[in-house]
């Protein structure tokens, strides 16, 4: 772990010292080197590595590797636009993304509850800088304010609870590694208590009704901001809920039933909202809310199967949603528009890019035998064991997801080319490589899904 952190630290002098023409190549290469080093965590007694400084297990290991994997991909995705800016701004951009991924990695790998909270909140700062400084739209400052206020207001109850926890137990150090052995004091309203101390995680995830910051942040963010936000930052919320859920004395689902109902409503409502979106990035952001509410429902059921399904869903969504934002960005760079009716007819001009669109869309709708399909099936089985009626209601999400996925595919790839588009420069090898590296882990996980269960 220290070797990987040292490799992360080596990116900083590389960006500051290396000549401009080699900066992006070296930063990307170091990112891939860090990813290769992080794969060794899979073989540390099968994601079982803990000491007073770091914790890598079945929950944090796959998410930490996903964080390392997405960093070089953000470097690949950002080059076409960022190379047009002054060198000082390019260096600041890479340093900011490096700091963002480093804080996220430390949040996933720390065994200390207070350090986890610090890194969890520290990731907010570089995210805000990326959105407000390098966002291309005029409402980026508003998006940054939404993100900051939602996240900070949700974090206040968690901070109070952590302080009380420290007062009761005298230490926060062994908390994450020994959560099952710590009993939380009984309360008259366990469901309300669960919602309050998980408010920070539910905002970050985000749960329906707390999600209004997410579409705005995605629409205003540059491509790297959208990729990291969808790929790893949303997963911090799911990771926090998975980590702290055993701290309840008894996880009584009847007490948290209102939250379950909101999550089920969010699964269906956001999937239906996707069908009326005209902005491509806004649609992808809404689909993220739908998938993450499925994770909330799975965590509330609190069975080994539902936890496994939630973990698989987070990994699958991190790869697929990031790939969707990359595809949306490639179209945006050629047409300067995210409106789907102005992006139509691309299949005739870019047939290979049409193949990437098809593959990623099939993964997004959960086509067998993809890891997305496996995660949805496991969560659906957990829902059926809990309540067959709820299973039938949530099963409608499969129809809605297929509907909006086909809607996006048809709206962007089929139809006549708009008259205002005269020339479209061809896809570069860098963009094909970027999309291939998003899809490759999903295909490899089909062969070995037990590595993230």
Image (tube, helix red, strand yellow):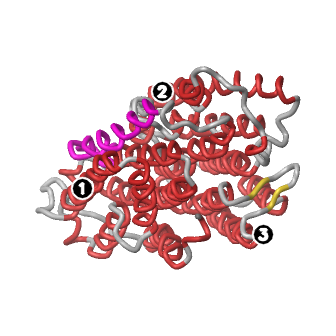
Tell me, yes or no, whether the highlighted magenta stretch contains residue 268: yes
Q: Distance between the residues labelled 3 and 2?
A: 40 Å
Is residue 437 in view?
yes
Observer-nearest of 29 and 68: 68
**Relative to residue 450, is residue 232 depicted above or below?**
above
**Rendered residue at 62%/48% (across/down):** 97
Observer-nearest of 324 and 206: 206
Badge 1: few (under 14), some or many (20 or more) residues near its Cα, within 10 Å? some
Task: Return the x and y of residue 73 as percentages of the image width and height.
Answer: 55, 62
Provide the secondary structure element on which disc 2 rests: helix
Q: How far apart are marks 1 and 3 (CA)?
A: 40 Å
Observer-nearest of 215 and 159: 159
Name the side, left or right, on which 32 lies relative to 238.
right
Mark identifier at residue 297: none
Provide the secondary structure element on which disc 3 rests: loop
**Rendered residue at 63%/51% (across/down):** 94
From which residue to which does the magenta span run?
257-283
Can you tell which of label 2 and label 1 is closer to the viewer?
1
Badge 2: few (under 14), some or many (20 or more) residues near its Cα, within 10 Å? some
**Rendered residue at 59%/25% (across/down):** 193
Q: Is the magenta stretch mostly helix, strand or loop?
A: helix
**Rendered residue at 41%/49% (across/down):** 291
**Relative to residue 83, is residue 21 depicted above or below?**
below
Q: How many marks?
A: 3
Of callouts 1 and 3, the N-terminal one: 3
**Relative to residue 202, is residue 367 depicted above or below?**
below
The residue that disc 1 covers is: 399
Is residue 82 in view?
no
The residue that disc 2 covers is: 146
The residue that disc 3 covers is: 44
Provide the secondary structure element on which disc 1 rests: helix
């Amino acid at each position: 772990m220290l070797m990987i952190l040292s490799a992360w630290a080596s990116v900083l002098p590389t960006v500051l010292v290396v000549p401009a023409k080699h900066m992006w190549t070296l930063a990307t290469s170091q990112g891939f080197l860090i990813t290769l080093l992080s794969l060794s965590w899979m073989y540390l007694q099968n994601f079982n590595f803990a000491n007073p400084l770091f914790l890598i297990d079945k929950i944090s290991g796959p998410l930490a590797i996903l964080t390392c994997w997405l960093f070089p991909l953000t470097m690949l995705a950002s080059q076409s636009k960022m190379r047009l800016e002054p060198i000082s701004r390019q260096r600041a951009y890479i340093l900011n993304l490096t700091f963002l991924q480093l804080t996220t990695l430390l949040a996933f790998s720390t065994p200390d509850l207070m350090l986890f909270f610090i890194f969890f909140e520290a990731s907010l700062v570089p995210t805000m800088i990326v959105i407000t400084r390098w966002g291309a739209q005029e409402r980026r400052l508003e998006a940054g304010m939404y993100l900051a206020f939602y996240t900070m207001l949700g974090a206040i109850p968690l901070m109070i609870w952590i302080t009380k926890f420290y007062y009761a137990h005298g230490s926060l150090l062994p908390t994450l590694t020994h959560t099952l052995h710590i009993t939380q004091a009984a309360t008259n309203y366990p469901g309300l208590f669960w919602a309050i101390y998980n408010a920070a995680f539910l905002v970050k995830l985000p749960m329906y009704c707390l999600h209004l910051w997410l579409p705005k942040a995605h629409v205003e963010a540059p491509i790297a901001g959208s990729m990291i936000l969808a790929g790893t930052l949303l997963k911090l919320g799911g990771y926090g809920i998975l980590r702290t859920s055993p701290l309840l004395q008894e996880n009584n689902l009847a007490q948290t039933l209102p939250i379950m109902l909101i999550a089920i409503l969010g699964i269906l409502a956001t999937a239906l909202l996707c069908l009326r979106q005209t902005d491509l990035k806004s649609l992808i952001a809404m689909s993220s809310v739908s998938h993450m509410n499925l994770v909330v429902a799975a965590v509330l059921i609190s069975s080994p199967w539902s936890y496994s399904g939630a973990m698989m869903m987070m990994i699958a969504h991190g790869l697929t949603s990031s790939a969707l934002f990359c595809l949306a960005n490639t179209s945006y760079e050629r047409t300067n528009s995210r409106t789907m009716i102005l992006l139509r007819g691309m299949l005739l001009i870019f047939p290979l890019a049409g193949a990437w669109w098809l593959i990623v869309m099939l993964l997004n709708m959960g086509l067998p035998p993809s890891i997305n399909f496996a995660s949805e099936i496991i969560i659906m089985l957990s829902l059926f064991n809990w309540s067959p009626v709820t299973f039938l209601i949530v099963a409608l999400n499969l129809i809605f997801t297929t509907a909006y996925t086909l809607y996006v595919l048809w709206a962007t790839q089929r139809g006549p080319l708009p008259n205002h588009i005269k020339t479209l420069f061809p896809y570069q090898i860098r963009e094909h490589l970027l999309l291939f590296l998003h899809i490759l882990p999903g295909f490899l996980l089909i062969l070995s899904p037990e590595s993230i269960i």
